[in-house]
Image (tube, helix red, strand yellow):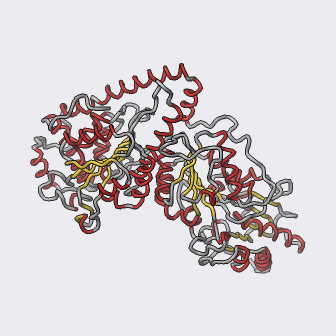
Amino acid sequence: MPADQPVARMTQRDRLCITTLRTLAIDAVEQAQSGHPGAPMENAPFGYLLFTRYLRHNPRNPHWPNRDRFVLSAGHGCMLLYGLLHLTGYDLPLEDIKRFRQWGSKTPGHPEYGHTPGVETTTGPLGQGIATAVGMAIAETKLAAHFNRPGHTIVDYHTYVLCSDGDLMEGVASEACSLAGTLKLGKLIVFYADNRITIDGSTDLTFREHVATRFLAYDWHVQSIEGDDLQQIAQALEQARAETTRPSLIVARTHIGYGSPNKQDTAKAHGEPLGTEEVKLTKQVYGWPYEAPFTIPDEALEVYRACIPRGAQLEADWAAQFAAYEATYPDLAAEWRAFHAGELPPGWDADLPTFCDDMATRQASGTVINTLAARLPFLLGGSADLTPSNNTAIKAATAYSAADRHGRNFHFGVREHGMGAILNGLALSRGFIPYGGTFLVFSDYMKAAIRLAALMRLRVIYVFTHDSIGLGEDGPTHQAVEQLAGLRAMPNLTVIRPADANETVEAWRAAIRNTTGPTAIILTRQKVPTFDRTRYTPAGELSRGAYIFSKEHRSPPDLILIGSGSELQWVVAAQEKLQLEGIAARVVSMPSWELFERQPADYRCLVLPPNVKKRIAIEAAAPLGWSHYVTDEGAILAMTGFGASAPFTVLMREFGFTTERVVAVAKALLTTPA
């Protein structure tokens, strides 16, 4: 929303509004005796101007689809955002401001999506916000390309970011911003608070690069201004909004802890309260006449609360546009509503294949992606420069680019971390179903972004191939060993490691249905058997996480053999050999611990009877966590070190992932007294 009139130099009313925002942050941090006052103090002029003059938002409806997005990438400065949300009329009472960082308040120590109205994404880990915003800006271009029609522009919004020196030091920001320039995301506007201070002190210690030049090299539109000059901020925002072919960076020279006589421009203003005496002195510098903390003058509140009727009018105008759109394009309008409701189209999984031939699960996954894509128009994704290896391409679709916003195949480049954050930005629309592929070992590069997806409970799907020593000759640098344990340790993340092609189909079905968090599908490079489901339990049981794959020939079983992924084949073969010797072994396929733990206790006891203590679990990965399912009376056949470079058949034999070893261990367990 352009300013109603050109912004002149700061008026007394502007100063009052900015000081109100600053003192609100100071008082909240002081009362909590915890927090970061310096960033809100320095960035109050930008925040005030953006929220009251430029940001298209409706405080009474934070989810209005065509609103502008604001991302506080410098999440430690969250009291700036909380102050703006309260002052402009969001459902964030002053009582929550007073309870900053306290149990049960809406004002946690860093902004949390879904917890505080008006917070667009969880931020705090530096670099994540700006990288996620790239995904949000991509989402706008995708929605505009899909839904807008001549004379009916129902998607038209900007994504604004406030970032810090620390954000731009993190590699994820470089990865995402480089791609943003390539993709020409003209509605992405970043305000960089160049205060030249980090926790350790001056940025001269570690960060002397010329940021403006770096972003020019990324093909961004770049401006440099003084960050406390309203006129310069306004002019920079106007020019950034007018630039439609490149993302924009506004390099604003700011002063952390602005106005604090003894802490401005020092690290002391970053992560600790100013202190009682310094608060008093700072308010004197501001000319603030009020002694009581959390004072909000009526004149300032009136200015901020004008956002309420203005936002209501903006949404009403858009609603009228949408009504005309719906009258002309009823099918598209219905699709729009379903998109924002997160609804899946009827019969979305009706055509999923059934496999008979042996194949790598990554190959099966590629077939499933293409089948799903035909019925799920908002399924989209790609790979970190491993598309042929991850099998992530939608063959009937084009590549998303600056020239083709309709494309559904994403080329992220060798940028796993940036890919992870961009996927989060896409998923925040709640209608897109984004996926991203790389080798499982490189999931470590994107772990921070995965963690935020889990925190926000976003429907992001990770296609992690080359899942074990089974990838063979590339050797231990590429052979995932510890990654499965790390991913399984993460709350809200569902990890699925299918055993064959048909379990892979069901893994995708479960991932699409999962709206409570991200899903990691773990896939093989090497070919594995596709089991005959007329002989064994149907693969649809994967939805339970673990299931009786092959029953024992007599009950109760003497022992239980648990297999995951490509190692299931060894226990299936072992069951047959043991049966010839009169040993009753049950085979359990356990592709997902998380799905299994969500099942009722009686089902879990049915699959893994507590009285059957002799159990063997086999997985070509670190054993951590398997002791939850295998007691001391059982055995875990797993990797206790790194792999090696050799053909996968040799590696499996040398590291003991064979039918013969399973049989030998089973016999040993049964001859060992309880």
Left or right, residue 560 beside residue 254:
right
Residue 310 occupies quadrant: top left
Give me the residue at 24% from left, 47% from top: 43
Residue 623 occupies quadrant: bottom right
In-front residue for pair 464/535: 464
Left or right, residue 180 beside residue 567:
left
Number of callouts? 0
Q: Position of residue 192 (x, y in %)?
A: 29, 51
Give me the residue at 51% from left, 41% from top: 405
Give me the residue at 62% from left, 73% from top: 474
In-front residue for pair 32/637: 637
Left or right, residue 326 beside residue 650:
left
Q: Position of residue 370 (x, y in %)?
A: 67, 47
Q: Is residue 190 above or below residue 673?
A: above
Q: Is residue 335 above or below residue 200?
A: above
Q: Position of residue 484 (x, y in %)?
A: 59, 65
